[in-house]
Amino acid sequence: MDDSPTRGRPPSWRSTRQRAAVLRALRDSPDFVSANDLHAGLTASGANVGLTTVYRTLRMLERTGHVDVVRERTGERLYRPRPADGHRHYLVCRRCGLSRPVDSETVEHWADSVAAATGFTEVEHTLELTGVCGHCRSQSVPPQR
């Protein structure tokens, strides 16, 4: 996913300055980020991008498979660019938000076998794993979210 005029652009993507700014900010985020935090960062950097544009851009990126999404405890959706090799599952720290990709081959095989056994196609799934990372456990950091 990049913000060049044609490369890495989702299908039916109409390139605008605002969408390019959202893409850059998302790509530059070190971890999962909420739409509100993404918008706040854009605003702080002087970008003139509305919150509605951020939400619409993220929704389109999700629909086209260009971002991975997790939910935090309050239900807010957090976004991160999807790696070129496809969708991943993550273990996310409930206190600091640190995320780590996890090997999910078993889950993927299970989802494929359920689809085959039921005759369903285009099956999608969500798996969310949360815990407390070693750093937060040792520091007794209070939850952020």
Image (cartoon, helix red, strand yellow):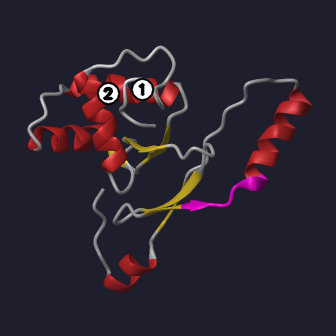
Picture quadrant of residue 2: top left
Instruction: Find the magenta span and give its range.
Output: 101-106
| Residue 77 image offset from top left, x and y in percent | 40, 40
| Residue 23 image offset from top left, x and y in percent | 34, 35
Task: Note whether 60 is above or below 100 in the view shown.
Answer: above
Mark 2, secondary structure of its residue = helix
Lateral position of residue 79 relative to residue 34, left or right: right
Lateral position of residue 13 relative to residue 17, left or right: right
Looking at the image, do the residues carrying marks 1 and 2 touch, with CB atoms under 8 Å apart? Answer: yes
State the quadrant of the C terminus. Answer: bottom left
Lateral position of residue 115 relative to residue 36, left or right: right
Q: Is residue 119 magenta?
A: no
Task: Note whether 14 is above or below 82 in the view shown.
Answer: above
| Residue 68 image offset from top left, x and y in percent | 50, 42
| Mark 1 neighbour class, 10 Å CA radius: few under 14, some 14 to 19, many 20 or more | some
Residue picked out by circle 1: 59
Q: Estimate the spatial distance between the alpha carbons at disc 1 and disc 2, rounded to whole Å.
A: 6 Å
| Mark 2 neighbour class, 10 Å CA radius: few under 14, some 14 to 19, many 20 or more | some
Labelled disc at residue 55: 2
Q: Residue at x 28, y 19 (%)?
A: 16
Q: Residue at x 12, y 28 (%)?
A: 48
Seen from the viewer's position, the closer of residues 8 and 94 is 8
Q: Residue at x 69, y 55 (%)?
A: 104
Mark 1, secondary structure of its residue = helix
Lateral position of residue 27 relative to residue 52, left or right: right
Q: Amino acid at mark 1?
A: Arg
